[in-house]
Amino acid sequence: MSGIRLLKKIVKNEAMKTDPKEIYGWRVFLLACSACFGAASFGWDSGVIGGVIKLEPFIEDYKLGDTSTIASANLQANIVSVLQAGCFVGALAAYPLADFWGRKWCLIYASMFTLAGVILQAAASGHLEPLYIGRFVAGLGVGASSVVNPIYVAENAPRAIRGLLTGMYQLFIVTGSLIAFWTNFGAQLHLHGATTYIVPLSVQGLPALFLFSLMLICNESPRYLARKDRWEEAKDVLRRLRQLPDDHPYLQEEFREIADQLEQERRLMGDATFWSLQKEMWTVKPNRKRAILSITLMVFQQLTGTNAINVYAPTIFTNLGIRGTSNSLLGTGVYGIVKVVSCAIFLLFMADSLGRRRSLLAMFLRTFFWMLSRGMTLASRIPQHSEMGLVVVVEVTREAAVVVVDHQDQEPLNGAEDQCPKSPLLPDDEPPSFCTLPKAHAPMPTATTNSSMPILPIPWKSLYQTLKAGASIWKSTTSTNADAKPAAKLFTLGFSDGR
């Protein structure tokens, strides 16, 4: 009962006040976590590959050559982006397959594809062909699960905590990235030879293995069963999920809502074909507005660049002046921690209380201004010292706390009172490739304490302490000349107001 009281303190909406407490049992949370391992597969792969391509044994075995050359950069981009190609195909195929096989079995088959792809990647042994094939096959599974996962959770979740449970999709993505970042860092420190990259590539199959195992014991979506006219099964699944007797008013009301929604959909659809539906969507003004809003929202969400930062975080931090592979991997680990913490805070305290629209508008505006300030900083001054790079790393990390929150506000909701578009195809973007500065590039001036570069303070005291400690570690291990000391002082001044 203490868990129910805590949930009521976190989620503040009318449904939470009126709905029976029995519906918030362990089954619905286990179901949501089980399905969200599909999201963890995407986050884990995005996080692991960016660090793997920076490891020296991987560069040597796969003959990437001088990583500062355009040819090497293109090869790395191909290795990264072939998974996105698989995700694109898998995401497109998942929508009809989810209606044909069902949500549960579509997730199970997707996990099998992901596992097969991971095995091929780990066993490639320096050959690009199986590596490419493995990443494409894994992409098929990751893309499919990215589509079906939020739909499955939303169709099983109680209405009061639907936003919370569906938002766990993003939490599992950033958690997968976090574990991948620290796996790369640990492998670089403690492993040697080919195992340095084989172990990170192998353990990225763990989320897919958990997805496969747990989905076998989970139920099918009651809404899908009702759509297939398997009404008795749907009612039985709903009764077990809600832990209520058949004659309970809440259960009867929810079952009636599902039936009414499906009847309305069938009445509206009639004998409509794909092209007649497209015509109605684009020629009827209200439908056209909804379609354009949904598409542009997801397009601009992806154009924030968060997936590109996840994949290329070690490369970005290296270009910002963080010396050494270990230090750049450590930077990505801190970046991952910030994303997980900010995501968890939003899910617990804002997802079902603040509202989707207000939080989305606020986070997009803050993301815009922070990205603009960082872009202007980098355009005017490219840091050449590790301490100077830390200043920009702090801002990149803090920006992640906002981007990860605005990604929470766009989950599909399938209740009677709120209908949204189907699941976003999260992995469909292809991250742009980043290249390092030419070696002949003239050195930029070292920053001084009277620099005009804007340093915006971190608002979280605990994060401030963590980053300050990290700055001291980097300073003691990477600083090689006195010119970098003013930059380290500038880094400290950024937190001088104590916020």
Image (spheres, helix red, strand yellow):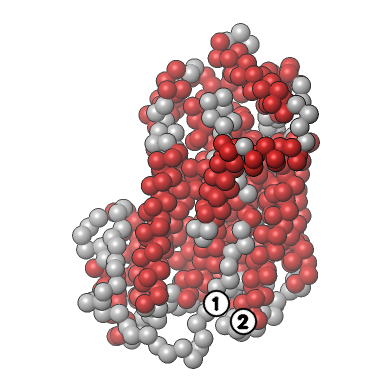
Q: From this viewpoint, which residue is outermost toward the top?
A: 247
Which residue is at a point 41% across and 62% down the rendered structure image? 371
Mark carried by residue 123: none
Residue that carries the numbered disc 2 in the rendered image: 70
Residue in view at x 76 percent, y 51 percent:
113
Q: Is residue 176 above or below residue 382?
A: above
Relative height, residue 460 to residue 101 (above, below): below
| 22, above or below 164, in the image | above
Q: Amino acid at mark 1?
A: Cys
Closer to the chain start, of discs 1 and 2, is 2
| Residue 188 locus on image (x, y percent) | 56, 70
Contact (CB < 8 A) between labels 1 and 2? Answer: yes
Residue 405 horizontal side relative to residue 422, left or right: left
Q: Amino acid at mark 2?
A: Ile
Q: Which residue corresponds to mark 1? A: 435
Q: Residues within 10 Å of mark 1 (few under 14, many from 20)?
A: some
SS for dot 1: loop
Q: Is residue 356 visible?
A: yes
Quadrant of the image for the N terminus? top left
Q: Secondary structure at mark 2?
A: helix
Query: For residue 6, which quarter of the picture?
Result: top left
